[in-house]
Image: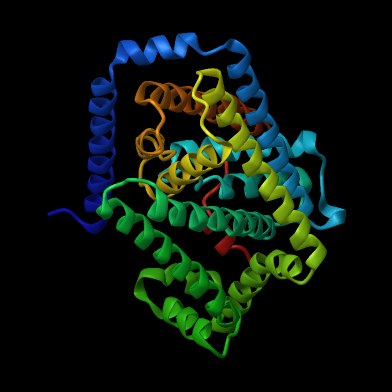
Amino acid sequence: MFNGKAMWTMLKVFAFLATVAALYFALRGIGFRAIAEAIKSTPRSSIWWAVALNFVVFVVLSLRVLVIMKPHARGNILTMLPIYMAGVFANVITPGARVGGEPVRAYYMSKTFGGTKTGHLGVLIADKLSDIAVFMVLVIVSVAFIALFVPLPLLTKIILEAAVLIVILGVVSGFLLRRHVTDPSGLMGKVLRAIYNTRLFTFMRHSFATYQHFEDYAIGKLDSLFSPIERMAASPWAITLIVAVSGLSWLLIFIAHYVLFWGLGAHVSFVKVALIVTIAYFCGDLSVTPGGAGFMEAAMIGVSAAVGVKTTTAAAVTLISRGIYYFYGLGVGGLCFLALASLYGRSKVSAQDVAASP
């Protein structure tokens, strides 16, 4: 008999293999030789521009984290960039395209800048929320454009629209429930007491003298986690600056792909390039494969073909752009992770924090 975790792992493995297989047959249908020739014909200047623009994107995203941090706790870009890249490495090797790196960044931020991991994780959650806000606007506009103007199958359009609706409902529900999270007399108090009394978490009763000690500790951690979000939300100037930085990062990503399309002679409009990239990233975010592998590539090729780009060109741009991403994610990010791990050690299990005296 398989337990739930084993079944879920098997489903993720199956989804990954199925997606990779579908991508393989799609690329074979296009023609591996034709794709290879298209990649070879790409001007080296276009590839180097894309590489440089992707580097600038990571610098901008690192700056966005520094902006959200408290002024007295901020480091500089030279210390933040390696930490951010180590998080990108974690993103690549964990399910989903852009998730998994926050705990790694929080750990090394606490070691480098001081402060608690929970506080830095709150900063990173605020950073993620600002990015989600800008990205969801791009996704809504892109899906609306596809629904109206792009000749995709009706079922594909319905699935995209449903996925967007589910994500929006999840984000809105999270904000509506936010005020209950740190209220001991409300929903959170009931949840904490249920956790404390559950047999599965008996170790908690040994780590804290009383339930009140446990509740004070948990609520304190949640306050530390959400305080950067509240601090950002309370400052219109901070919101404007962070949203502007998020918008700039996406603009640079679009330009990097536009340069590759243009280099291959595909005179596709910048708006269509933005549409292609946005939908590809959205599909990658919804996937269960490490780094969104398979899903993002298939989506980028499919949407590119739907808006009139030659399949060989679409495949070449997709493979080059994803190759650049993996170069930074696995190569540069992996080296940064190893360097930080050698300096500070690897992130320890969070249960050690729970065992700490409140």
Q: How is the image coloured?
A: rainbow
In percent of width and height, residue 209 lies at: 57, 78
Residue drawn 68% across the image and 55% down it: 120
In percent of width and height, residue 26 lies at: 26, 28
In which quarter of the view is residue 50 placed?
top right
In which quarter of the view is residue 137 placed?
bottom right
Side (left or right) of 325 relative to 21: right
Q: Is residue 329 visible?
A: yes
Side (left or right) of 348 relative to 279: right
Q: Depth check: 352 or 7 in front?
A: 7
In percent of width and height, residue 87 lies at: 58, 40
Q: Residue furthest bottom?
A: 185
Q: Count numbered badges in the picture.
A: 0
Residue drawn 62% across the image and 73% down it: 217
In percent of width and height, residue 203 lies at: 45, 68
The C terminus - image quarter: bottom right
Residue drawn 51% across the image and 31% down it: 268
Residue 59 drawn above or below residue 207: above
Residue 306 drawn above or below residue 181: above
